[in-house]
Image (tube, coloured by chain):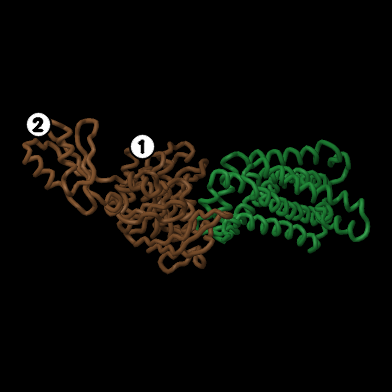
């Protein structure tokens, strides 16, 4: 089931929490929703789940509209809210039962669904405990289990790995990836490596507006634009002369000497300098022991588009 | 209807799991039993096989008992965020409210069933007007429905349980005491209006064995009006502007 968001706006008084955003998520796609705190991620998710109404704009899940088919949309969505609210005095099994019956899981298959969720989310040892007795990681698993109990076509996860240890994070990522093969997944997070590891596509939102949209590779490429290489050159006589000759190459825009003695060379836009650098070293009988292409990571991309 | 029952069942289970139900039932039976059998105008003092002292004290016990039940119903869910959990499931705000309303009403019903031994014992002591007793029980149920409505409204406007409790008592004081006082202060249509708004007027008529549709409409309309306001409070998040 595809999610289609069109010109969505949400105002709180004079402040725009979400300001005219449009995007689409296809079935079988995992979309990462990134943005600084207060950027409008959670508000967008709450509108998609029919928890709140937009000031204007439209969201469609398949053929369902948030304005007309709220009950059908709620049944099609599995939602894990930001702070994972749980009834702490309820045992895990009872909670999943409650959640399943509310989402319309037939009585005949409820037991099987609960068993499957307990197995899938690794809750077997803890299933008879009260939720209040569980660690944060297990509570997060219970939250995920309740979101998936009715086998929804769309999963919306607001910061699903908050509070988990590194092993649990890897497990949950694998789980999300597995689910994402057949379903539509929209997840928000602050953890950038997580988006890279899990998501097919990323949307970065800032001040209620979409500021970047594409696959992690695409975004990195767009953000860097220019070729950057890090060089380790040995057996030269004068560092300054190396610096000058590198700078004099026609394709090079910027040369920097790093603290450890390596050089960082940035090419001009749409130019490539690596062949020229190699030739220069050969001509001068310098020994080139390292030439590492530097890629911008998502953190740079994120900072670039979110810091005004 | 199914969703209302699912929510009511969950609330009832939580009443019993957290001991709230047992404590409130024991306090209700203890207080009403004490004043029915041992103190004030009790059965032995009046020398009549009448359950009216029980109904009189139940009126005041429920005034405190019900806000204590309803105060956490929505306020607590708002505070810990589980209301968002419920509101993103395939249920409407009305179903959530009605589920909670019926859970409280069923708990009151259970407390009333536990008080039946008082009625049975008194009926062994002498002739009892059985019709009036059943009318009285019906009166208590309708009175409870009105107080639960008020309690849920108070709980929906705040996320602090104590505020919800006090607000519920404050609104209740008007219907239980203030309007009664005002009705005796004013005469004419104003006095009559205050008298109509006084819960005791309608309750007393029912415990005397009179079932008047006006009384039933009065209690029901308070409950429905308060639930309607509570629903408006809950659905504020859906206002587009």
According to the colouring, which chain is green? B
Residue B231: quadrant of the picture: bottom right
Q: Which residue lies at the image location 26% right of the left edge and 51% below the top edge? A: A225
For residue A220, side relative to residue A101 (left or right): left
For residue A44, side relative to residue A226 (left or right): right
Q: Residue A233: image x %, image y %?
A: 13, 35
Identify the secondary structure beneath mark 1. Answer: loop
Q: Which mark is residue B230?
A: none
* Disc 2 versus disc 1: nearer the observer: 2
Q: Nearer the viewer, residue A295 or B204?
A: A295
Identify the secondary structure beneath mark 2. Answer: loop
| A84 in relation to B138, above or below | above
Q: Residue B100: image x %, image y %?
A: 61, 52
Which chain is mark 1 on? A
| A69 in relation to A189, above or below | below
Location of the C terminus of chain B by quadrant is bottom right
Mark closer to the chain start, 2 or 1: 1
Q: Residue A168: image x %, image y %?
A: 34, 40
Q: Colour of chain A?
A: brown
Q: Nearer the viewer, residue A65 or A226?
A: A226
For residue A234, side relative to residue A67 (left or right): left
Q: Is residue B4 visible?
A: no
Q: Nearer the viewer, residue A146 or B140?
A: A146
Residue matched to label 2: A235
Q: Which residue lies at the image location 15% right of the left edge and 40% below the top edge? A: A245
Q: Which mark is residue A165?
A: 1
Residue projecting furthest to the bottom: A63
For residue A36, side relative to residue A221 (left or right): right
Which chain is mark 2 on? A
């Amino acid at each position: 089931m595809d999610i289609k968001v069109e010109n969505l706006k949400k105002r709180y008084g004079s402040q725009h929490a979400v300001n005219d955003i449009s995007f689409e998520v296809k079935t079988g796609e995992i979309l990462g929703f990134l943005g600084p705190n207060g950027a409008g991620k959670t508000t967008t998710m709450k509108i998609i789940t029919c928890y709140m109404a937009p000031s204007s704009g439209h969201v469609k899940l398949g053929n369902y509209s948030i304005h007309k088919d709220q009950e059908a949309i709620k049944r099609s969505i599995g939602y894990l809210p930001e702070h994972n609210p749980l009834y702490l005095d309820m045992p895990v099994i009872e909670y999943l039962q409650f959640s399943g019956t509310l989402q319309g899981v037939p009585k005949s298959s409820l037991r099987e669904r609960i068993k499957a969720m307990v197995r899938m989310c690794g809750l077997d040892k803890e299933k008879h405990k009260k939720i209040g007795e569980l660690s944060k990681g297990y509570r997060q698993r219970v939250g995920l289990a309740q979101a998936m109990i009715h086998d929804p076509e769309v999963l919306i996860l607001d910061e699903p790995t908050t509070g988990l240890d590194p092993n649990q994070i890897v497990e949950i990522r694998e789980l999300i990836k597995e689910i994402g093969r057949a379903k539509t997944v929209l997840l928000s997070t602050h953890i950038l490596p997580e988006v890279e590891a899990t998501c097919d596509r990323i949307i970065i939102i800032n001040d209620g507006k979409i500021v970047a949209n594409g696959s992690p590779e695409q975004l990195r490429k767009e953000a860097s634009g220019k070729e950057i290489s890090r060089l380790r050159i040995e057996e030269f006589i004068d560092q300054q002369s190396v610096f000058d000759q590198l700078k004099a190459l026609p394709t090079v825009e910027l040369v920097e000497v790093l603290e450890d003695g390596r050089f960082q060379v940035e090419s001009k836009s749409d130019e490539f300098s690596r062949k020229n650098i190699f030739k220069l070293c050969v001509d001068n009988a310098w020994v080139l022991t390292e030439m590492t292409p530097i890629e911008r990571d998502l953190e740079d991309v994120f900072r670039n588009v979110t810091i005004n | 209807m199914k969703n209302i029952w699912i929510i009511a069942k969950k609330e009832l289970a939580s009443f019993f799991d957290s001991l709230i139900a047992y404590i409130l039932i024991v306090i209700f039976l203890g207080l009403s039993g004490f004043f029915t059998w041992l103190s004030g105008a009790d059965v032995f003092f009046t020398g009549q096989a009448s359950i009216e002292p029980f109904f009189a004290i139940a009126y005041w016990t429920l005034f405190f008992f019900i806000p204590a039940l309803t105060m956490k119903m929505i306020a607590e869910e708002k505070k810990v965020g589980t209301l968002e959990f419920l509101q993103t499931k395939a249920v409407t705000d009305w179903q959530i409210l009605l589920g909670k309303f019926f859970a409280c009403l069923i708990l009151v019903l259970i407390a009333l069933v536990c008080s039946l031994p008082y009625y049975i014992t008194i009926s062994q002591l002498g002739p009892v007007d059985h019709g009036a007793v059943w009318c009285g029980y019906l009166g208590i149920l309708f009175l409870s429905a009105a107080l639960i409505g008020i309690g849920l409204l108070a709980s929906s406007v705040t996320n602090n349980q104590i505020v919800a409790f006090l607000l519920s008592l404050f609104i209740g004081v008007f219907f239980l005491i203030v309007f009664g006082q005002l009705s005796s202060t004013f005469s004419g249509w104003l006095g009559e209006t205050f008298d109509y708004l006084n819960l005791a007027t309608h309750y007393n008529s029912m415990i005397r064995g009179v079932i008047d549709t006006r009384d039933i409409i009065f209690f029901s309309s308070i409950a429905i009006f308060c639930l309607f306001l509570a629903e408006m409070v809950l659905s504020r998040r859906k206002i587009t502007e």
